Image (tube, coloured by chain):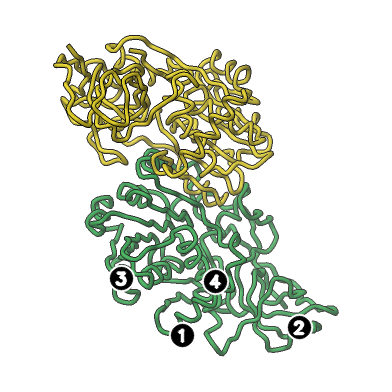
Chain colours: A yellow, B green
Amino acid sequence: MNHTIVLNKRPVGKPQLTDFSIVTEETPTINTGEILLKTSYVSVDPYLRGRMSDSKSYIAPFELQKPVSSGIIAEVVESNHSKFSKGDFVSGLLQWKEYQKSTGEGLIKIDAKKAPQSAYLGILGMTGLTAYLGLSEIGNPQKGETVVVSGAAGAVGSVVGQIAKIRGCRVVGVAGTDEKVEMLTRDFGFDEAINYNTTENMTEAIATACPDGVDIYFDNVGGDISDAALLNINKFARIIICGAISVYNETTLPKSISVQPFLVKNSALMQGFIVSNYAAKFPEAMQQLATWLAEGKLTYVETVVEGFTQIPQAFIDLFDGKNKGKMVVKI
Amino acid sequence: MNHTIVLNKRPVGKPQLTDFSIVTEETPTINTGEILLKTSYVSVDPYLRGRMSDSKSYIAPFELQKPVSSGIIAEVVESNHSKFSKGDFVSGLLQWKEYQKSTGEGLIKIDAKKAPQSAYLGILGMTGLTAYLGLSEIGNPQKGETVVVSGAAGAVGSVVGQIAKIRGCRVVGVAGTDEKVEMLTRDFGFDEAINYNTTENMTEAIATACPDGVDIYFDNVGGDISDAALLNINKFARIIICGAISVYNETTLPKSISVQPFLVKNSALMQGFIVSNYAAKFPEAMQQLATWLAEGKLTYVETVVEGFTQIPQAFIDLFDGKNKGKMVVKI
């Protein structure tokens, strides 16, 4: 038998376990040109929260009572497809199922000997691409500039900080526990890190950590932390809006300080970043990330949860910051 | 005798007449390499409010008890300078004085026969350049796109709308009186115009006026109108933050809806625009504006107030929207 996780109802505020159902179904049989996939790793990501709501966004909402999908690594366990063989591992946007069939469309083969499978969901996958392309394409970091990263201990943030260091920037991270803050400076080479949960005045804390002001703010969180960063930006600052996890669960339109006067004063730019818009640059970016990883210039942490049924809880835990680095579920 | 207007105290909230003083002083005498200027037209602009506060911005604050300065047209009434002759008219950032001397630095000669003097403060001056370069450089309007302009009946907004029409866009303006709204569609060729003072739900009104959504929002006002525009943006929208007159007089940090989630969802860009950053493009822009003006493709309105002592009141009146188009003071 096979299991699949469907969206049972649309979350209101923070997602709950009851928003998901586990459904039992037949394991599919494959036809010519198809492969049967066995899921090995599932990526859970904050952006999925957006797809669970029924609102216009850059990607269609999930349908109720239909499987949720996300980045998945799977093993080809049967193949009637000329380009895939039994034993291949693939990465792609797949459904939260133990087994599923596919025509292979949109899947890429990964080399599970070169790097751990889960790395292809993280630093060599969408996470790494998001960090690399968001920082490069919108941020355009220059040597000597100051980069502030929020959600810095998360999957994307921890990579952004390391790339900014490689680019010769001063890097300040914002995270939510002392343990994460310590990890940022110790393991990821951030120059300074700030625990927003124990810091009374974030605006002053950022000002102190960034004596030359903020040239680039890589925003994974939105909300008060973003306001504090904005109050410290320099002329021609670039603000990459990569996520807004702090407000994804709000049921009313969240309010912040008006950004407009700060953007005018500083001739600053704020741009929403969606990695899929930069698909043409994936090969180049992936190559660079793999090189840095091999050279030991990039490192990563993962939070690995085990068990297919744990996927919804792992997703929910993202909103409590229970992950360090990339959160994946091993099946 | 000569008169000058100094900043008497820094405005708190909306500027008051008592924030300014008129001081009597000697008419200056000029040395070699200097010219004596007699002010003929003074530009009053919302951005000057920022310089009256003592806060970090893209341009230094005015000093207390020192003359205020803005865009001015003046006549050369005496010259000890090889490049300027008596009877020349010049445009530049000059002080609120009836007479002042200058080395000529930063001044450009204008042809007062080709266009009215005041046009060089407006459509052929900073106002026109701001409209043209803000829309072109950040907005990059494409044929068939929808452009929303706030402060549409103001000096910059009315030009932005006309240029967007020349570029083949659908143009919707937002202004604060029925008279202005009528002017937008009748005189400036806007497709639709909305009176924000008589419209209960601006978000719906913009949605109705923009059935294909908003591709470019040229923001002169900030505040609630900007929020309403943001709620209607399309994927890859560009938001030009040119001004935020609605919040310039706020004494606390104004709040708005959080823009970040909307920018992410739509891969949208929001950028602060300061015309002086684009000085290299002034000649090209000026040439284009002059051509369109000569061809009758661009038109403009002015609100002309008379008398040197009326400068502070004319400036204050901007915040009550008493101007239509460019506000200038004729001396």
Q: Quick check: marks 4 and 1 in contact, CB under 8 Å?
A: no
Q: Residue B179 appears in which quarter of the rendering?
A: bottom left
Query: Residue A213: where, in percent of width, then height?
Result: 64, 38
* Mark with earlier residue (4, 3): 3
**Residue designated by label 4:** B310
Kindly tell me whether residue A233 is visible in this rendering.
yes
Mark 2 vs mark 3: in front:
2
Distance between the alpha carbons at the discs numbered 4 and 1: 32 Å
Q: Earlier in the sequence, mark 2 or mark 4?
A: 2
| Circle 3 Cα neighbour tier, 10 Å, few/some/many (<14 / 14–19 / ≥20) | few
Q: Dot 4 surroundings within 10 Å: few (below 14), some, or many (20 or more)?
A: some
Q: CA distance from mark 3 to mark 1?
A: 27 Å
Nearest the viewer among A88 and A155 is: A88
Is A90 left or right of B136, judged from the image as shown? left
C-alpha span from label 2 to label 3:
45 Å
Q: Residues within 10 Å of mark 1 (few under 14, many from 20)?
A: few
From the image, tell me which residue sits under label 1.
Answer: B294
Label 1 SS: helix
**If the image is split into quadrants, where does the C terminus of chain B sit?**
bottom right
Mark 3, residue position? B179
Residue B183 picture quarter: bottom left
Quarter-of-image position of residue B321: bottom left
Q: What amino acid type is highlighted by mark number 1?
A: Ala
Q: Secondary structure at mark 4?
A: helix
Q: Give the Cα separation between the discs numbered 4 and 3.
A: 24 Å
Q: Which residue is mark 2?
A: B83
Q: Are marks 4 and 3 on the same chain?
A: yes
User: Subunit of mark 3?
Assistant: B
- On screen, residue B26 above or below A25: below
Element under label 3? helix
